[in-house]
Amino acid sequence: MTKPVSVTFLGGLGDIGRNCAAIEIEGKIMLLDCGLMFPEADMLGIDLVLPDFSWLVERTDDIVGCVITHGHEDHHGALAYALRELSFPIIGSALSLGFASNRIDEAGLLDRTEMIVVKDNERRRFGPFDCEFIPVTHSVPHGFATAFHTPQGTILHTGDWKLDLTPVDGRLTDLGVMGAIAQNEGVRLLLGDSTNADQHGHSRSERSVGKVLEDLIAASKGRRIITACFASHVHRVQQIADAAIANGRVIATLGMSMKKNVRLAKEMGLLTIPDNKLLDIEDVKDLDPGTVCIISTGSQGEPMSALAKMAANESKWITLNDQDTVILSSHPIPGNETNVSNVINSMARIGVRVVHSGLHDVHATGHAKAEEIKTLISVIRPEFMIPVHGEYRHLQAHAELARTMGVKDANVLICEDGDRISLTDTGIERSGSVPAHYLYVDGIVGDVGHGVIRDRQVLAEEGVVVVIVTVDHDAAEIITGPEVITRGWIYADEAEDLLEEMRNLIGDAVMGALEKGDHDSETLQRVVRKKAGKFVSDRTKRRPMIVPVVMSL
């Protein structure tokens, strides 16, 4: 009897971001990605969201390494945090490792890992893990699908992918290798990217964006051009640069990640921009605006990004005006729509001409749509299939596509973060769960939990009422107060009568407790909280946070 092989999902199922899974063979673990997620609108004050590392910390000695499928932060951005508690080698393409090492180096943690470069179609063994790295086309170069050749058959993880028949770098998704694996040994389990599973048809080629960009830049003679895209989207940067140079413009980058990534891609030969056409941002301020194209970060409207600072007139380098054209060469990630809309509105007020994907085809997705997914499944013919990487509706749509393509209904599993499945001689089974909560980052890791988020939501939606009272326990009397301080509940200057009534009721309640012999501060705080909460609810039908402060002499 062959030992089972298990897969544990730590993030990325039900969300866009935080992608992380663990494949386990013979008691050893190989991580598959370790990404972050950007906060949603109700995650007040949160900078980033990470996978829950608690299960991994318990198994720290069993971790053989981490395969990062490509260079996007939703797949490698959490490594700079995981390496604070764990230590393991990181495996990926040279570009992916370069992008990941930038963040890890900023955190001062490069000494806790080893970077292992693998190449297209290379097959390597790491402990009990026999891994094959298959080229796929995505919106960042040198992404991989990964085939894990295990005692329970091949597990194929697609990574983020699409079928682009005319990619900018000519590097195609290698269906031939996947087909050969399917033909020779078969694919026992497919873990497939679900992001666009609910969208019909085929994705557009990245190359088609280049022509649109060139036409837009050509039509903007005399105007300064600012383009915004993901700093990791090397092919998009190349096409922007080509279009700008063809129209007699020089290039400048804005944003630290853009500057670093462009430098790295140029050093690796993945980005071709003549040195005399690539200037520092400080060198283009005095040039004729019609000869300049700036490539900036901030396409997702991130509050502190270079583009957001420009829109708020807070940029050190660029002051926008009505002679500028800004091209948002991206599409908002789910959850970022409001931020992007706010940035567009701010720029429109300045008089900037803003071009986005709703007006022109300035963006092409990096993820396969329904017909491409069906093509892949027809080539791979997996025995079992689990949709990954997407919101629940995406996972569900992907599962339906698998059934349409002949995968047995019982062999398609929709899992969620924390689920653990096992491949055995008899099939596939759910085998428990592990902690997979959101780990919030607000300044430092572990500083914020679900309770703090709930408190922030109450403060944001209902406000706070602080009641301060000083008592003499021995004399059983109130020395000062109660004083009521409120923010976000009512405007105190306009509700003095209401606040006076509240002070009197709380004072009576405290005196009643003191007279009954309830002198300890904890009991008196409960009395204040209960009386204040009932009064606020009865009189205003609101539920602000009540903070009782009882001091004693």
Image: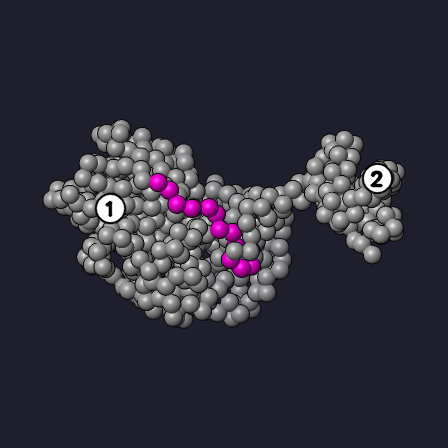
Q: Which image quarter holds the N terminus?
A: top left
Taking the view exactly as shown, the residue that stands out farthest to the left is 184
- Provide the residue designation for mark 2: 512
Q: Which residues are magenta?
A: 432-445
Q: Which structural element holds mark 1?
A: strand
Q: Identify the residue at image location x=31%, y=65%.
A: 115
Q: Nearer the viewer, residue 35 or 52?
A: 52
Is 420 left or right of 493, judged from the image as shown? left
Inspect the magenta stretch and tell me whether residue 254 lies in it. Answer: no
Q: How many marks?
A: 2
Residue positioned 52% across, 48% down in the render: 39
Is 96 left, or right, of 516 in this rendering? left
Query: Is residue 452 something that shows in the picture?
Result: yes
Residue 238 shows which numbered tag?
none
When asked about the image quadrant of residue 403, the answer is: top left
> Which residue is drawn at the image coordinates 72% and 47% (left, top)?
522
Estimate the x, y position of residue 460 in percent, counting from the top left.
Answer: 66, 44
Report the amino acid beneath label 1. Val
> Where's residue 213, x and y in %?
41, 51
Q: Position of residue 254 (x, y in %)?
A: 50, 62
The quarter in which the C terminus is drawn is: bottom right
* Image-quadrant location for residue 15: top left
Q: Decide if residue 50 is on the left or right side of residue 87.
A: right
Mark 1 = which residue? 5
- In the rendered structure, which disc, 2 or 1, sits on the residue that comes first in sequence? 1
Colouring: one colour
Q: Amino acid at mark 2?
A: Gly
Rendered view: 100 above or below 489: below
- Pick the residue in front: 331 or 335: 335
Q: Is residue 327 visible?
A: no
Where is residue 469 drawn, in percent x and y? 82, 49
Image-based side of 106 in relation to 430, left or right: right
